[in-house]
Amino acid sequence: MATRTKKTATAGEQEVEETATSGKAAKKPAARKKTTAKKTTAKKASAKKAAAKKTAARGKGKKGELATVEASAEEEGEGEDTPARRGKGPHYLVVVESPAKAKTIKKYLGSGYTVKASVGHILDLPKSKMGVDLEKEFEPQYEVIKGKEKVLGELKKAAQGVDKVFLATDPDREGEAIAWHINQQLRHPDSYRVMFNEITKPAIQEAIANPRQLSQDNYDSQQTRRILDRLVGYQISPILWKKVRRGLSAGRVQSVAVRLICERESEIKAFVPQEYWTLDALLEGPSGPPPFKAKLSRVDGKKVELKDATTTRGLVEEIKGASFTVSKVDKRERRRNAPAPFITSKLQQEAANRLHFTAKKTMALAQRLYEGVLLGEEGQTALITYMRTDSTRLSDQAVAGVRDFIQQTYGQDYLPEAPVVYRTKKGAQDAHEAIRPTSLDYPPAKVKAAFDAMNDDMAADMFRLYELIWNRFVACQTRPAVYDQTSADITAGRATFRASGSTLKFPGYLAIYGASLTPEEEAAQEKARAAGDETAEDATGDLPVLNDGDALGLQKLVDEQHFTQPPPRFSEATLVKELEERGIGRPSTYAAILSTIQDKKYAEKIEGRFRPTDLGLICNDLLVKHFPQELDVTFTASMEEKLDQISEGEANWKAVLKDFYEPFKETLEKAETEMRDVKREEVKTDVACEKCGHIMVIKWGKMGHFLACSNYPDCKNTKDFKRDVEGKIVIVEEETTDELCANCGKNMVVKRGRFGKFLACSGYPECKTSKPISIGVSCPDCKQGYLTERRSRFGKIFFGCNRYPDCKFAAWDRPLAEACPQCQSPYLLQKFSKRDGPFVACPNKECDYRRQVQDPEAVAAAAAASPSPSPDASTAA
């Protein structure tokens, strides 16, 4: 019988020997080889014992040491898809979320470890129903996510025969929930939780050497969040389907974000501009030119408010002949401190302001930097720490390293006497460090060539984000910038003017991070100005040498009329900032929230600012009216605090759900009966139907509000409309074409449908002929149809064959009816990138043909369709 011996040696454990007997009989050796075989067996047994002793000795290290694993040649040759086997030395399974992360971690752990990826969640609540049993204390009904059966099967197979399972999912509450579900499915007796704040060899080995048990409190907190979202979303959404439109969704956090956008729009519409005037004096110092500017600040020693032209011009006439004298000169040194290292929300804000990235894009790029990128011979290397954090805390090791780097790179003058410590805001979970580079061995200049060599459209943006994170981290431990600031009060009769100027004396952190203000600094400065703090003016440039009592020469007085401005609409950066300050959601959810409210057409971004759509305004009005508590900003923030309390073991998750659901259930029942039915609403107008003479009414449909004949169904006439500045209805006439209908001969008109514009017979409804609009390019796949502009179900424009579904050609970039001069491809693509602008390229990946576009019309067309992965025509249609 064949015998297999396994020695298990882990840190702090006793040596254990197991013997397994194979069910298959070994072949009987020939008699003449019997003696030789016995000697060989004895030698092998002796070698095994010696190796086992070495392994055990290494395994019996001090507490906290990583167990060393020796594997045989056969084991070292095992691929990642091969299940862990019991062989020589112990075997461990490490489960992570990302396949890219799995490769990097496998490299650092070496043989004896099998690293598998769950690719996110493996269990979730069912999509087809709420999946929460309200009669059994909110018991969730999890099921294996469709398509994850194979992944789960591989994890179970890999867990067979291993000594331990390390659950290394992302180090947040969602990662804790994923680890919990994997543990439930694998049912391995020795499963442990490990967390990697950074994917580096020391961090991974330390985490593996110091595992912990799964956290019930963190899991309960995440589970409560998931159940809360189901209770709200799966019970309010059906009401919106019934009353407004099918397919809508409501969310505990997303609906509050839409409310903020709608309320800001209401503020803008209700805003009444107020007139005000400013008065500046262009003065010349005792030494002559160049002149400098001073602003009127006080009259008769009081803060001045010039509200009309009469008051302003009267003051101008009064002080025109007065003598201008310096009454007080104030010189002081002003310091500008470096901003804190990045937390998630601040990273999203700065990436939006400086790099013009969306929150979703920023998080996707940061995820890849965290998981690792290929750096030449070094292979897959993680460049930043975990990117979902609300803490500004930095490890002592990281601070010591960056201080050495600052001293060596910038000199002693840039290094503070002691490390700079930033205070984490109240209510932060503080589970992880701030976002920073994993190693100072990878400055941007050193890794740029690796990014440039990547065959990846996102490589350039990944590098820009990494450079931003690097610069912020180094800057946060650098000395403040120092300015010499001079301000002078200048009297002219009963008026006092103020002149300010500042010059940069020492750049400090600005030498690394740049001189532009961060969002926090801009907000603080604006707040100070509103409070009347005259020193808040960020004046730059030198003033001439001024002394008390100096007489100044007046060149001219400049009076200007202004009007107060409404509050600005939210950008991605300012909306994230608003959500963060109000305690709505968590940093890891902001990107998803901003994407969802646009995908669902509740808001749209115009010139980088969020505007609510008609659909968003209608849904917000209904939800705020019928769910005032759930849509209240403070209620949503207080619920986040309760989730934190659950995570800290200070609250029971079932009690929190019960306290929420009992009043919510009553609100739901009232909304079912009392919410107005927008679908069936008809608002009468004074517009007459040109077909039958009846009054037209405003109705609500899939494409928003439209005019319909009140004589429906006898008359099916409909019209698009808009309102003029006075609010009157103006009918939008249909765009006619010269193309004739193939069935009745009438002119075809351009109509707007769910998936974009199309041609329809003007004789509708008698003739219902319709067809897609050609972009003038024949289909390169089927050679029979033509390409048309269409919209995916998420609203993104793409180009597909009019013969879909018989032909499934699709492209995100606009095809051009022009053959490639190099490879003779029948068409070219019109592309656009932020770095290079518009250009034309060949769709054939093996062909490098490319040319820039200078035509302004082509530039506008190209910018409308940014490059993306090839769409799935079957889902887009």
Image (cartoon, rainbow, N blue to C red):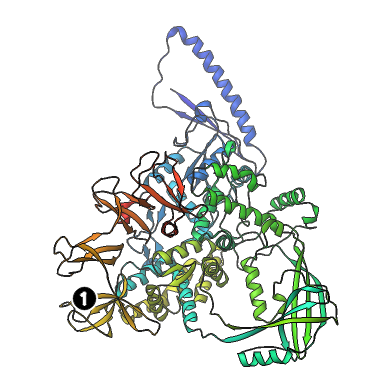
Q: Nearer the viewer, residue 23 or 551?
A: 551
Residue 508, given in percent of the width and then of the height, sits at 75, 59
Give the amino acid at mark 1.
Asn
Q: In the picture, which quadrant includes the C terminus?
A: bottom left
Compared to residue 863, the image places residue 255 above or below, namely: below
Residue holding disc 1: 717
Q: In the picture, which quadrant includes the N terminus?
A: top left
333 relative to 697 in the view: left or right = right
Specify the farthest residue to the top.
Answer: 32
Examine the rendering and report whether any part of residue 81 can be seen.
Answer: yes
Q: Secondary structure at mark 1?
A: loop
Q: Nearer the viewer, residue 270 or 93?
A: 270
- Marks counted in the figure total 1
Compared to residue 595, the image places residue 114 above or below, namely: above
Res 761 → quadrant:
bottom left
| Residue neighbourhood size for the residue with mark 1, other residues' Cα within 10 Å, grouped as few (<14), some (14–19), many (≥20) | some
Q: Nearer the viewer, residue 222 or 404?
A: 404
150 relative to 503 in the view: left or right = left
Residue 258, given in percent of the width and then of the height, sits at 45, 72
Q: Residue at x 59, y 35 (%)?
A: 377
Q: Residue at x 75, y 62 (%)?
A: 480
Examine the rendering and report whether any part of residue 308 can be seen.
Answer: no
Residue 300, given in percent of the width and then of the height, sits at 75, 92
Residue 74, given in percent of the width and then of the height, sits at 50, 27
